[in-house]
Image (cartoon, rainbow, N blue to C red):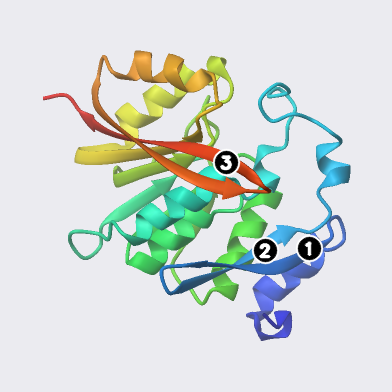
Amino acid sequence: MDPAQLPEKQYARLREIRKNYKVDFEPLRLRGKEIQLLQVTDLEPLLAGKDPFADVEDFPFWVKLWEAAMVLADLMLTTPPRHEGQTLLELGAGLGAPGLAAALAGYRVTLTDYEPHILDFQRVSAAATGLKGVECRMLDWLKPPTLPRFNTIIGAEILFREEFFAPLLNIFRSLLADQGVIYLAHDARRKSLPKFLHLAEKEYEIATSARKMRSDDKDLTIIVNRLTRRS
């Protein structure tokens, strides 16, 4: 992708990003669609040997395209909106692959995260992919803003700190529309996932599926959960 083809506002954002990160566009191709995803090309200085399953307090989860995000992005492309104007919220979106895939599928998408520079990555990727109308905004789970309800809420690798389980459930209560659906995707090694689902099952019917994939010469299992409110 030639950055010079970006709209001027997003090209300016890209120049600012490059002052702090080594980045490039890496296309994510799924089911005949292509997302031009702006990614950090030199991750080691940011990761510094941290383990995303052990060092959850200070691991920069936003900076990596997780396998769970790729699985969730694929799911969004195979689960198009049932009607025009259906809205979708991605929580802890990071680079935003699932939400951008949802936008390609026809959803009206809002990507959220907790730091402004993360939103800049999302905005540049949306523009590079040719998507218009994708909203990117800050969302602090502990102090969520007033937002309309969404038909669909999604998240990949967002259940890594147990102290955020209760705030996340509060967000689900306040932001999921009637008859809405939640999709979550996580690496099966994420030990906090069963604990969260145990809490959530008091309010939601939970369907679970597993998708196996190979990444970096390792076999992985991604758990996808579909949550709907109990009647």
Q: Nearer the viewer, residue 2 or 120?
A: 2
Query: Would you say residue 93 is visible in this rendering?
Result: no
Residue under the image location 66 percent in, 74 percent down: 9
The residue lying toward the viewer, choosing from 139 and 212, is 212
Q: Does label 2 or label 1 sit earlier along the sequence? A: 1
Residue in the foreground of this view, choosing between 15 and 152:
152
Q: In 3D space, how far apart are the residues under numbered discs 2 and 3 (Cα atoms)?
A: 26 Å
Left or right: 47, with 26 as reference point: right
Left or right: where 198 falls relative to 138: left
**Residue drawn at (69%, 30%), measured in percent from left and top?**
52
* Front tag of 2 and 3: 3
Residue 220 on image: x %, y %: 55, 39
- The residue singled out by tag 1 in the image is 23
Query: Around disc 1, counting alpha carbons within 10 Å, would you say few (fewer than 14), some (14 to 19), or many (20 or more)?
Result: some
- State the mark number for residue 219: 3
Q: Which amino acid, by three-letter code, is at mark 1? A: Val
| Image quarter of the C terminus | top left
Please, what secondary structure does the residue beneath circle 3 have?
Answer: strand
At horizontal 47% and vertical 22% (from top left) the residue drawn is 193
Gap in Å between the C-alphas at discs 3 and 1?
27 Å
User: Quadrant of the rendered structure where residue 161 is?
Assistant: top right
Q: Quadrant of the N terminus?
A: bottom right
The residue wearing badge 2 is 38
Q: Is disc 3 in contact with disc 1, using a CB cutoff of under 8 Å?
A: no
Q: Is residue 64 above or below residue 175?
A: below
Give me the residue at 74% from left, 72% from top. 12
